[in-house]
Image (cartoon, grey):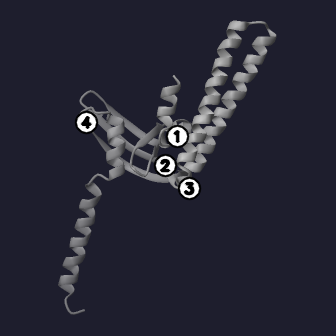
Amino acid sequence: MKHPASILLLSLLVILAAGCKDKESSPIQEALGAYILQGQEGSFELYRIEKIDSTSFRTEFERRQNVLDLKLREETRFYENYILERKPKNATRHREAMERARASLKGLDSLRTTLEGRLDEIAYYDYVFSGRAETANQATDFANTYASITPALEVIALSAAQKDLHKSGGRAIPGYVQLFEEAE
């Protein structure tokens, strides 16, 4: 060792630089903070975050397809029951819901076709995190909270329970939200 002092100094600088880097906010922290604060003045501090899963567009299309298939089956069952009970107003309401579900399935197929080359790309990542948001009026602690975030850092879902996290997952599919806005 020719220059132990210079090695020690270099090591100290590396440690200090790493310590400063930890204090800076990450792009994920910024995205979560913006989503949680929703334009309010305040701050968000991320204590811990862990990536726990990822979902491809293909998997998300399958989930949405299953949800819409289930909706169509339920509406069909209600429609048939109301026809048998001779309740035409109720039957009409469920027939219209069946038509909307069929139109949604057709729209979903169209979206899938437009993304055909990207089906195996990541639609979003699931994270579990802990942190704290503070505004002038309130402070909120987040302990073991779940978030789905796209690779472009768009937060599409936030949930206290992991089982509820994918209910909004379709939002990661380009055109999905517009499909259902047009259906209304």
Q: Tell me the kind of residue under disc 2.
A: Tyr
Report the residue at 57% width, 35% height from top.
107
- SS for tag 1? helix
Count the numbered circles shown.
4
Instruction: Kindly tell me whether residue 27 is visible in this rendering.
Output: yes
Q: Tell me the kind of residue under disc 3.
A: Asp
Instruction: Measure the C-alpha gap from mark 4 to mark 2.
Output: 26 Å
Report the residue at 46% width, 53% height from top.
50
Disc number lying in front (2 or 3)? 3
Locate residue 15, reporting x and y percent.
Answer: 26, 69
Q: Tell me the kind of residue under disc 4.
A: Gly
**Of 5 and 161, which appears nearest the observer?**
161
Q: How dense is the environment of label 1, judged by Cα within 10 Å: few (below 14), some, or many (20 and up)? A: many
Residue 160: image tag? none
- Describe residue 157's horizontal placement relative to residue 90 as left or right: left
- SS for tag 2? strand
Instruction: Measure the C-alpha gap from mark 3 to mark 1.
Output: 16 Å
Pointer 1: what residue? 169
Locate residue 179, reporting x and y percent.
Answer: 51, 32
Report the residue at 74% width, 6% height from top.
87
Residue 120: image tag? 3
Q: Earlier in the sequence, mark 3 or mark 1?
A: 3
Instruction: Measure the C-alpha gap from mark 4 to mark 1.
Output: 27 Å
Disc number lying in front (4 or 3)? 3
Disc number lying in front (4 or 1)? 1
Q: How dense is the environment of label 3, judged by Cα within 10 Å: few (below 14), some, or many (20 and up)? A: few
Q: Tell me the kind of residue under disc 1.
A: Gly
Residue 42: image tag? 4
Q: How dense is the environment of label 4, judged by Cα within 10 Å: few (below 14), some, or many (20 and up)? A: some
